[in-house]
Amino acid sequence: MLPKQVHLREIQIMMLKRRQAIPDRLTLDLTAGSVDVLVRQNARAKHYRLSLHPKHGPTLTVPKRGNWPDAQDFLRRHHDWLNQRMDKIALPRLVEPDMALPLRGVPHILGRTEQLRGLVQIDDALQRIDVPGAPEHFARKLGDWLKAQARQDLERQVQLHAARLKLSPKGITIRDQTSRWGSCSSSGQLNFSWRLVLAPPFVLDYVAAHEVAHLREMNHSPRFWRTVKETLPDMKLGHDWLKENGRELMRYQITR
């Protein structure tokens, strides 16, 4: 009789575990501060897994037959692992009101206009950017404006360097990419990260020159670097700045 009772108790515990809802995210307290962990259920996953996504940050994968208590226990056992790694990376930051966001290298405080309609307003004297619309649309609306600002600056600098080198890009695309600052396709299309508008102008200028030079040399050979220097003699300033500070700019997100 006892084995049956024990077996029944195990079944009840298992059912209770499965009834607990699995949240979309949770917050952990680490040495570097509070961090959001994205929770994803994956039908193909066979085990619990904790990873660091370049855009979403810490991500906990829960298998189809997993449950929340076991997932929490898995996180507790991997707390030190996550703590050590989070100390070495820059956490993603969703843009939001009251945040200080650099624009062309100058910090601006983000705010709301308290109006549902209208245009993004910028006051360079007060170093402030105000965004209209409902709070839940703040990041998207600001993101659209930042992309437009980035396009404006990049189109001007790409045109400048293309004229100097006598080259003709097919077009420009502004992307929300976090793995690279720019790229050049074999068809001559130039792609750039909108985050370049956050950096000082000489940095955006360097990336524009870099990608235009790829229209002539689709590599990073000595001839390529001579081409970049031909149109931008002080290219080292932008190159070195990105190497030192680029990772920090990649933290900023306009979508979750």
Image (spheres, rainbow, N blue to C red):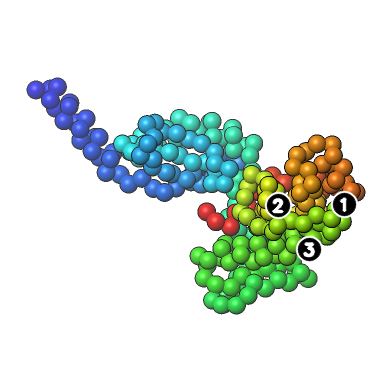
Q: Is residue 81 above or below residue 244?
A: above
Residue in the image at 45% along x and 30% along y: 77
The answer to whether residue 229 is left or right of residue 151 is: right
Quadrant of the rendered structure where residue 33 is?
top right
Q: CA distance from mark 2 to mark 1?
A: 18 Å
Q: Could you say which is closer to the camera, residue 57 or residue 213?
A: 213
Q: Is residue 222 above or below residue 133?
A: above
Q: Are marks 1 and 3 in contact (CB under 8 Å)?
A: no
Residue 24 picture location, percent across and down: 42, 49
Residue in the image at 75% along x and 59% along y: 154
Q: Earlier in the sequence, mark 2 or mark 3?
A: 3
Residue of label 2: 188
Q: Earlier in the sequence, mark 2 or mark 1?
A: 2
Quadrant of the rendered structure where residue 145 is?
bottom right
Q: Residues within 10 Å of mark 1 (few under 14, many from 20)?
A: many
Residue of label 3: 156
Residue 108 picture location, percent across and down: 71, 63
Query: Callout 3, which amino acid?
Result: Arg
Q: CA distance from mark 2 to mark 3?
A: 17 Å
